[in-house]
Amino acid sequence: GNSVTQMEGPVTLSEEAFLTINCTYTATGYPSLFWYVQYPGEGLQLLLKATKADDKGSNKGFEATYRKETTSFHLEKGSVQVSDSAVYFCALHYGNNRLAFGKGNQVVVIP
Amino acid sequence: NAGVTQTPKFQVLKTGQSMTLQCAQDMNHNSMYWYRQDPGMGLRLIYYSASEGTTDKGEVPNGYNVSRLNKREFSLRLESAAPSQTSVYFCASSPIHNTDSYEQYFGPGTRLTVT
């Protein structure tokens, strides 16, 4: 089936540190891939997307590259800020305009 | 544009009570969705409506019903609430199908507690 796996557990890091959140997927074909962000008390917002292999999505200093060889779409940011504290969800598109979401990763950035 | 709006923001129900969660979007999107979010579970799709006039079950439809009232509105009904339905509910919408716009736009959520 179509599914997304994110690394387990919250991520706690200091301001200006490098952030990586791993995401791997299982799907038929080459689906569009997404990262969504959820700030406390809010709904999800699209952070970035990639629609085909080797595409790089980027926004607000975050990047992710669509790697079909490793079926991965890892999220990275070179220097995090306290304002980046949020929950991050990886997702893929599948049949009939639906998205499959990973379980999310809580990111806490300490000043 | 208000985007996707949901009412109410918070609700407390007793076991066995019924209620309807309302959702509306003003972006002329064809597809609409209802999810629930539980700790450690991510988002799970309850029901969706690929286009006006159609609805389909998602991963966790038991205990829920939906109505796609028109293109703008998609409601979720709990006929007899149970404590297992305590969750945060999100509505989302998505533009007409094309090669690039599968992204979904989310409402602010409804936090429901069933006692």
Image: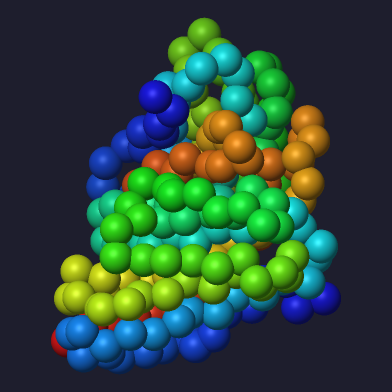
Relative to residue A5, is residue A90 depicted above or below?
below
Residue B43: % across, % down: 40, 54
Q: Give the position of the N terminus of chain B as an image quadrant.
A: bottom right
Query: Residue at left 45%, top 44%?
Result: A101
Query: Residue at left 69%, top 52%?
Result: B51
Q: Nearer the viewer, residue A57 or B9?
A: B9
Relative to residue A79, is residue A68 depicted above or below?
above
Query: Residue at left 57%, top 15%?
Result: A29
- The answer to whether residue A76 shows anywhere in this view is no
Q: Which of the 4 image quarters holds residue A81? A: bottom right
Relative to residue B21, is residue A111 depicted above or below?
above
Residue B97: % across, % down: 76, 40
Residue B79: % across, % down: 32, 77
Q: Nearer the viewer, residue A79 or B90?
A: B90
Q: Is residue B54 left or right of residue B25?
A: left
- The answer to whether residue A6 shows anywhere in this view is yes
Query: Residue at left 21%, top 90%?
Result: B14
Q: Give the position of the C terminus of chain B as an image quadrant.
A: bottom left
Q: Which of the 4 image quarters holds residue B87? A: bottom left
Q: Is residue A12 left or right of residue A55?
A: left
Q: Is residue B73 left or right of residue B14?
A: right
Figure coloring: rainbow
Q: Nearer the viewer, residue B18 or B8?
A: B18
Relative to residue A39, is residue A21 depicted above or below?
above
Q: Residue furthest front?
A: B53
Q: Is residue B13 left or right of residue B8?
A: left
Q: Nearer the viewer, residue B103 or B14?
A: B14
Q: How many marks?
A: 0
